[in-house]
Amino acid sequence: MYRWFTNRTLILSPGLVALALAAVAAPAPARPLAAPDAAAFQSAVRAALPFALVPPQAAMRLRQGPPPQQSRRFQPNYPVVPTVFGSDYGANVVKAYKWTGGLLGTLVDPAINSCQATPFKQPAGMWVDKPGRNLWVANFGSQDVRRFAPGSTTSNLTLRDIDSLTGAAYEPIGVSYDSYASGNLYVGNYVNTAGKPGDIEVWKPAQQNCNSAASYYLFDQRFQYVYFVANDRAGNLYVDYADTAGVGHVCFITAANATAGPSNNICGATGDFVSTVSLGYPGGLMPFRAAPADKSLGVVDQLGSAPSLLGLDVYHPLPLLSSGPAEVPCTTINPGFSDPVTWAPTVATGIGMFVSDATAVPGGELIRVKTGTGACPPTGPGVAISTIAGFTQLFGTAVSPSYGP
């Protein structure tokens, strides 16, 4: 797998060196790369990268025009049924499938209007909210977040912020909507195009419109690259990130601190914790939705801080990450993953899920996994019961409905 680290140096895992050399007709790039939009970089991404990220960083402001014109009556482009989404980073689309397979629709969103500056480009992390079953997509390449109503293949809202000091854009990877408490939208910005470290962009409900700037930013000196974000039912926020040494961690932020306004030390605030667990490479994270409250946190470890931890590491019980045994995974779900990136639950009890695997087959595939239950729900390595392929470079996944009834 391709990895981007400090100084924009491209690192290839040993198993993919041959593939990378064949797909990108150039020497293995152990040198700093040009800006993310450079032609050479884009060519490399689209030709060969199942999971490619480029460093950007820190705080900014939003620039938006008036909202796009919309019809008075919503006409869905595909059936509104239980759906699993896969973001195809290489093809610049999101694909919607039935849980059991079968393409329902392709979200392309090519329009450029007063609300969005560029076409849909390099979609990454996704989240489905509870109030409207809307799909939120973080677009790394177009440097914005877009919202899609159920059944629609074109967005009805674009949120984009820029750094008021440098004019640099943010490059989002992860997105999360707090459906149960604040209604805030949280965006994990990998870095920004001026080279500042990553941060968390917060959009309060009143600012979730095309004409607004982000409400505030959450930052911590530990952050180098911010990846994915997730909320639990109490409104607490979980963030995985790489520190300045390239080591992955999870930051737990209480709901009170997540909603209190801007912070430059968010993981060090009272009541917040940084895990001592080292992630080989941070992937998607999300609490298991086990009613009546969240019970466990699932964190994808893409490289595995230990060989046995490659896959979906499960931490139990919540709240997590204070110290001691809670920081040791109670189990790791891996029915044979090759390169897991993100995951999403399929049922409210948290015993079923989809995992996006970037290199399981050429282009990647969505893997539906069933697991058992027990003292540490769910238990065991899991069993793959079905797969969905047909991607160019699969990145993220989301499920609707993902929170149960």
Image (cartoon, helix red, strand yellow):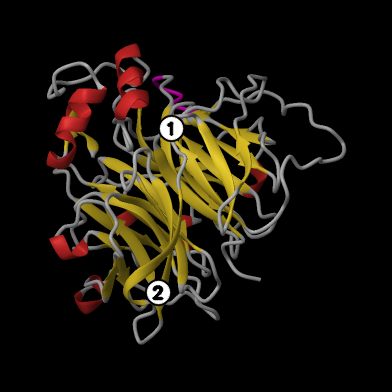
- Please state which of the two labelled residues, at mark 2 or mark 1, is closer to the viewer: 2
Mark 2 sits on what residue?
371
Residue at 25% across, 72% down: 329
Q: Which residues are magenta?
A: 162-166
Farthest residue to the top: give it. Answer: 39
In-image side of 199 versus 231 (left or right) = left
Q: Nearer the viewer, residue 206 or 39?
A: 39
What's the residue type where badge 2 is placed?
Answer: Thr
Q: Is residue 100 magenta?
A: no
Residue at 43% across, 32% down: 140
What's the residue type where badge 1 is placed?
Answer: Phe
Element assignment for label 1: loop
Mark 1 sits on what residue?
140
Quadrant location of the N terminus? top left
Which quadrant of the view contains residue 257? bottom left
Q: Measure the alpha-carbon separation of dots 2 and 1.
A: 32 Å
Q: Position of residue 15 (x, y in %)?
A: 15, 41
Q: Is residue 164 magenta?
A: yes
Q: Nearer the viewer, residue 277 or 58?
A: 277
Image vertical order of residue 333 relative to residue 17, above or below: below
